[in-house]
Image (cartoon, rainbow, N blue to C red):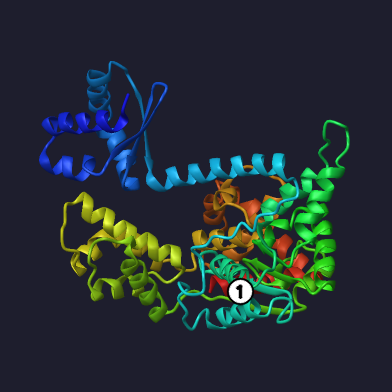
Amino acid sequence: MNVAVLWDNFLDEIKKEVTTLAFETWFKDTRLYELKGEKAIIIVPLLIHKQHLADNYGEIITNILYKLSGTNYELEFILQEEVEEQKEIEKRKEEQIESKQENFNRIQSNLKKEYNFDNFIVGNSNKFAHAASLSVAENPGKMYNPLFIYGNSGLGKTHLMHAIGNYIVEHSDKNVLYVTSEQFISDFRGVNKKDDNGTNLDYLEHFKTKYRNIDVLIIDDIQMLGTATKTQQEFFHTFNTLHSDNKQIIISSDRSPEDLKLFESRLRTRFCWGLTVDIFPPDFDLRVSILRKKILGGAIVKEIPDDVIEYIASNMRSDVRTLEGAINRLIAYSAMMNISDITLDVAIEALKDFINKGVSEKNNIQKIQRIVAEFFRIAPEDMKSKKRSANLAFPRQVAMYLCRKMTDESYPKIGAEFGGKDHTTVMFSVEKIEREMQTNKELANMIEKLKKDIQ
C-alpha cells in the first residue's frame, strides 16, 4: 500500500471531522512514514504533537485508517530527527558489519561534518578555548599536547573537538579518530571476547591499530572512565604510545584534571602536560549571538524580534541547550495557540514557567542535590532513592552535609527532601563528613569546590 496516497486520503477525511484550527495545528504538517506490520508510524513536527495526538485524537485516527485500509493499526508518533537518528544508527550498524567483513582494520574518524570553526560562535566565555583549539588544529602534535578542554555540559566542548578534527582532515593527510569514553570502554571490553577459534588476536590487533596507529585521538567525556579501572590502565598505555610518537591527543571533561578524583594520579598528571582550558557559560552578548545564529540559520522559520531575543538571553544563562530549549518552547507555544506574531508579551507568557525555573533557584536543597549529583555523575533522583551502594551513599552524605551548612533547613526537613530519611540519618551524615574532612585533604578541597559551585 502506498503510504503517501493513504495519508493524503486520511488528511482529506480528518479535515471533515475536526475544526480548521485543529487541522492546521495538529494534522497539516504530519505524514505517514511507514506501515510496519500492524503499526502505523507517523511523523509529527514537534514533541508536543506526539502526546497531544495520542491523547486526544488517537481513536479517530485509528478509525479513519481502518476505514481506508481495512487494518486496525497501532499508532506510533515520531519526530523527523528521530527518523534520522534511527537511519543513522542502522547505517552505522551496516557500516560496522560491512567494515568487519571487507576490511577488519579500516578505521573511521566518526567526525561530524556540521561541527566546524566557521559555525562556532565565539564570545568572552569561550574565546581562549577557541583560540587554543585552532592552534592545535593548525599544528597537531606540535602545539599543546594534550589539549584538555573542560566545562559543564552544553557549552560547546564537543563542537570544538569535532572542529579540530575536521580542520586537520581538510588540511592534511593525517588519520583522525573521535570517540566517546563509552566507545573506548566498549572497544576495550571487546578485547576479551573470543572468536570462533577461541582466540582474540584479531580483535586485539584491531584495537591497537584503531587507537595507536593514528595521528590524532579525540576522546570525549573522559570522566566516564572514572569507575573503569582496567580501561584507565589501557588508556594510560595508549596515551603514552601516542604522546611519545608526537601524535596529538585531545580530551574533554566536565571537570578539570585536578577534580577527576577517581583517576590514577599518573593519568591526571599527564592530562596537564599540554594545555588545559575551560569553557564558561555564555555571557549576555554571546547568548544573543547564539540565538540569532540559530534563527538566521534556518532552524526557526518565524521572525523573532530583538526584544524577545534579548529577553530570553537575559534570563537563560546556563548553556546553549537551555537557550535552544527556550526557543523551541516559544515556537511550540505559538503554534499551539495559533499565534502568528511573536511579541515580548507572548514570549513572557510562553516562557514564564521555563524561565522562573531557570533563574529563581536559590541555595536550596534541590539546587544542592542537583549540583552534587552532577559532580558525582549520578542522577538527582538517586539522592532520594533507597539504594545504599557506595557510589550513591557517599554523594548523598556530602549533599546532606552541604544542605545543613548552606541552608537554614532543619535536620527533619533535609531528611524529608532526601526521600523521607530520618533526622538521625542526616545528623550521622553531617558528622561523618565533618570528621573525615579533618584528615582527608582531598575531601576538604572537594567540599570547598562544591560550595563555590553552589554559590
Q: Quadrant of the N terminus?
A: top left
399 vs 379: above or below: below
Depth check, front residue: 434 or 14: 14
Image position, residue 429 (x, y; %):
68, 57
| Residue located 31% across and 17% down the image | 71
Depth check, front residue: 330 or 40: 40
Image position, residue 36 (x, y; %):
42, 26
- Would you say 13 lies left or right of 114 here? left
The three-letter code of the residue at mark 1 reads His
275 vs 394: above or below: below
Residue 271 position by quadrant = bottom right
Image position, residue 208 (x, y; %):
82, 55
Q: Residue furthest top?
A: 70
Element type at mark 1: helix
- Would you say 324 lies left or right of 372 here? left
Kindly tell me whether residue 28 is visible in this rendering. Answer: yes
Depth check, front residue: 174 or 83: 174
Q: Which residue is mark 1?
A: 171
| Residue located 21% across and 29% down the image | 10
| Residue located 52% across and 79% down the image | 126
Residue 133 position by quadrant = bottom right
Kindly tell me whether residue 441 is visible in this rendering. Answer: no
63 vs 264: above or below: above
Image position, residue 201 (x, y; %):
87, 44
